[in-house]
Image (tube, rainbow, N blue to C red):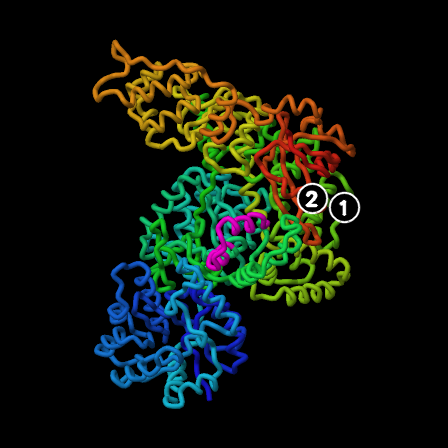
Amino acid sequence: MSYAPLHVHSAFSPQWGVRSVEDLCAAARALGLKHLALTDRNGLYGVPHFLAAARAQGLIPLIGAEAKKGAQRAVLLAQNAEGYANLCRLLSDLHCREDFDLAQSLRAVRRGLTILSDDAAVLAPLRRQDRADLYVELSPGHQMHRALALSRELGLPPAATSRAVLLEDEDYEVHRVLRAIALNTKLGRLPPGESAGEGDRLLSARALADFFPHCPQALDNTLRIAASCRGDWDFSATIFPAFRGLADGEAFAQLEARARKGALWRYGQMSARIEERLQCELGLIRDKGFAHYFLVVEEIAKQSPRTCGRGSAAASLVAYCLGITHVDPIAYNLFFERFLNEGRLDPPDIDIDFPWDERDAVLDFAFQRHGARRAAMVANQVGFKGRSSLREVAKVFGFPEGEIKDVTARLSHYCTAGRAAAAIDRDPQFQGETLSEDWRRVLTLAGRLDGQLRHLSLHCGGLVVVPDEIRRYVPVEVSAKGLPLIQWEKDQAEAAGLVKIDILGNRSLAVIRDALAAVKEHTGREIDYAAWRPLDDARTRELLCAGETMGCFYIESPATRQLLKRMFGEGRTPDADDLFEHLVMASSIIRPAANVFIREFVARLRGKPWSCAHPLLDEVLRETYGLAVYQEQITQVAMALADFTAFEGDQLRKIISKKHKAQTLRDYHAKFLDGGRRKGVGEEILNQIWAQILSFSGYSFCKPHSASYALVSCKSAWLKANYPAEFMAAVISNQGGFYSPLAYLSEARRLGLAVLPPDINAADLAYSGRAGGLRVGFMQIQGLSRAAVAALLDERRRGGLYRGFDDFLRRVRLDVADVRLLIKAGCFDALEGKQRRPALLWALLAHRHAAPGASLFDEAPPQLPTPPPYDDRQVITQELETLGLLVSCHPLALHRHAIARLKPVSAARMGAWTNRYITMIGWWVTGKTVQDKDGRPMEFVSFEDTTGLFDATFFPQAYARFCRKLSRLRPYVLKGKVEEEFGVATLTVEWVGFLE
């Protein structure tokens, strides 16, 4: 006795299914089943993962979906490639067409599909068209008697299913929680018809047969259906875009011509080395069929003069010659095989950063060029994670919002829902508290939601272009922004052969663009972006070596600033090429799992004697001081030390970076050890090198990627070193970066810039910087409408500067609330004086109530009160209310008398107190909570005073004692010991208090 499960839901059925495809396949095998269909609701969201999981368990996978729209529903199974394409088209219409009708749509695209349903409204019209491949679905617990009657009435064969959602009893509560979240209702109010039944689970053949003694043919039909459906699905073929309808040979000829022209543009002449590398790359691109892809990407990249081509593609000379990337792969010894090699089966992609506010226009161009028929965005499959899982489950259990917020706000960002219970038990934020049993139940259920698909969102930039019709390959939905969106995330898209182009928004490119425009406007100096060599400038090199990189792309975090200071120390400034190479290393070694190697790296860089762990690694690791720094060095080390092929080494890299979760690291570890032993490498050395390889887990970067980012970092640093006012204005205006606007204003003061308030005649929408001053823009005024800003700027351009408040009111008609904000923000202080703010508010009210057509400033104006000016405290309060931060001074300046009594050590003098206990005053800038090697929470915090930034460490004991005091909105009194390493001082905090 046997059957084929034809109606099975996984966790890829949004807020319906419960178990992963791996769990379902393992359970099917344990039940002795040979086939398994995946029929997630309204989508093929997990098909590539399902195919891999089914094959791993020796099952024959069947591809399908349960299509449900309103009251209509049917299970659809793909018999062949045509059926799969039609299934994708139908599911796309279901999501994209408001007038979608399931029965009517199936009439148009049913070829190659087997259809199961118990819905007469679906089956009857299809039967009139053709009875072939139509079945009536009979499922225990779902009115089987009516379904059997429908089968007899229509003369259609029955097929047994269990509508499997569950595997175990505990799954049912998880399913009900998911349904309550989906319907935004309490668990106790969940309508019965809105969830699966307790019996909707994957059953053995015998268990299912017990429900069909009167209709055994229903089980037999499942095997007939399974036999008629394809089970050897292969999605491994790469699907390339087609460039302007060219044949493959034509596309390659055009690519070669453009690459050679670009080589002359980049180098001036062709050397033997350039020619050899170019021929090698072009040959591989031709053989792999990548010519169309390069041409499509080049066309997109040309839509902006300021881009950053990054990722492994930056190792390609062809990409460099086409202007897709901007770092010379020959000069910096970039490893092309990391991007493309003979053995690579999956398609690599090219990532291009554009200024963040130009990205949408670039996407519009791409869709205009290729059309929504051939192009779509890659999805993010948004699930339940960490605190959000906890919040949603607590809501459906009816916990008050305040209580939910109190618990979730204290959970660390690294806490996953599955580990929340254990984290709460040991987290100092919950010290002395015992959670109720109801909360424990919430925590347990929230942990079960990890990995559940909730909905789709737009990937940050992934675009897929195919040569014909995207809906042949994958169902397409419509994103909230109106863009077509495939149902797969990037890894599944890659597994299915779809080649992705990442079109990403980068705020730092906009910073560079805006700062360069301001420099040109103020000085007439124009920088050639493509030929720009920022490290030829001595001031830029000095700034980078001093770690004064706040605001500079990718190298402004506290950890990176400290690393740069440690690497170069005082007075050590290498030449341009040497500095660039070391910046690339710094960008790559700053990764979570590499902390243990960073200290050794800095020591070797600063003169500690070293040698590679084994002579076989000399060529691979020489440039990085004998340590693995770049992602591709995993591949190179495995090839040199253990005789891996380039393909095997690349697979190891993917496993380490967790892109291929199904692969077992254990197998590759054994292969690495065996290969090393055969080459005579000792066990201890192999284990040392393997530990370095493991440090790349999670996320890490290849050298081409880091080199591309380092070039943008250098351009940012050049602007900061030479045009600080224009640069800092652009940083704050583009609202990116690692820090808050207040922190950047403090940095501006440290650079010697005067921070100026918004002014009705001098300010623009954005921040502006010029000649030693940084002017706050109207954008900083909270609640001020953009329409008001546009109106006052348009009138100022048309009619000239405003001569006073009365002139402003005559010329611009604004909402009273907007004018009130302008007054309180001090925008009229330069014209009228700060002391007249109360009088201006009265004048505004009088103007508002003046008769239509009358003027407040006629010959006989009304008598208005003469209020006294605001005191300093009220002015400061208005500044905080309207701007959200202090512009007139640093927040600590308000506490100068209290600070003076404590006689603290300033940030500027901290380094002189090494190994001594001191008191410091600090304003919170940024912090990062991490775990030590024993899993205990601790925190790194950056503070500032009026003289500079300083970094403090709260080790687990101090963190446990003071973590509840770590609020950002007050000045801290910090006591602790100054520690120094490689010339960089930090404060190890032992006591925390606050200024009274």
SS at badge 1: loop
Position above or below: 981 against 829: below
| SS majority, magenta | helix
Task: Residue 736: give x, y in percent of width and height.
Answer: 49, 38
Q: Quadrant of residue 41?
A: bottom left
In the rendered structure, find residue 961 and report the number of the disc placed on it: 2
User: At x 30% / y 65%, what residue is drawn?
Assistant: 70
In the rendered structure, find residue 954 and report the number of the disc placed on it: none
**Marks 2 and 1, how far apart at CA:** 41 Å
- Determine if residue 367 is in view: yes
At label 2, counting other C-alpha atoms closer than 10 Å, the crowd grade (few under 14, some 14-19, many 20 or more) is: some
Q: Which residues are magenta?
A: 391-412
Q: Nearer the viewer, residue 564 or 339?
A: 564
Of labels 2 and 1, the one closer to you: 2
User: At x 32% / y 54%, what residue is drawn?
Assistant: 372
> What amino acid type is highlighted by mark number 1?
Trp
> What amino acid type is highlighted by mark number 2?
Arg
Position above or below: 669 against 30: above
- Determine if residue 252 is in view: no
Task: Residue 549: give x, y in percent of width and height.
Answer: 59, 33
Tell me: 155 left or right of 257: left
Q: Nearer the viewer, residue 292 or 356?
A: 356
User: At x 44% / y 57%, what residue is drawn?
Assistant: 499
Label 1, on which residue?
Answer: 610
Tell me: 388 left or right of 842: right
At label 1, counting other C-alpha atoms closer than 10 Å, the crowd grade (few under 14, some 14-19, many 20 or more) is: few
Task: Residue 189: give x, y in percent of width and height.
Answer: 41, 63
Q: Nearer the viewer, residue 800 or 792?
A: 792
Asked whether 406 falls inside the magenta stretch, the response is yes
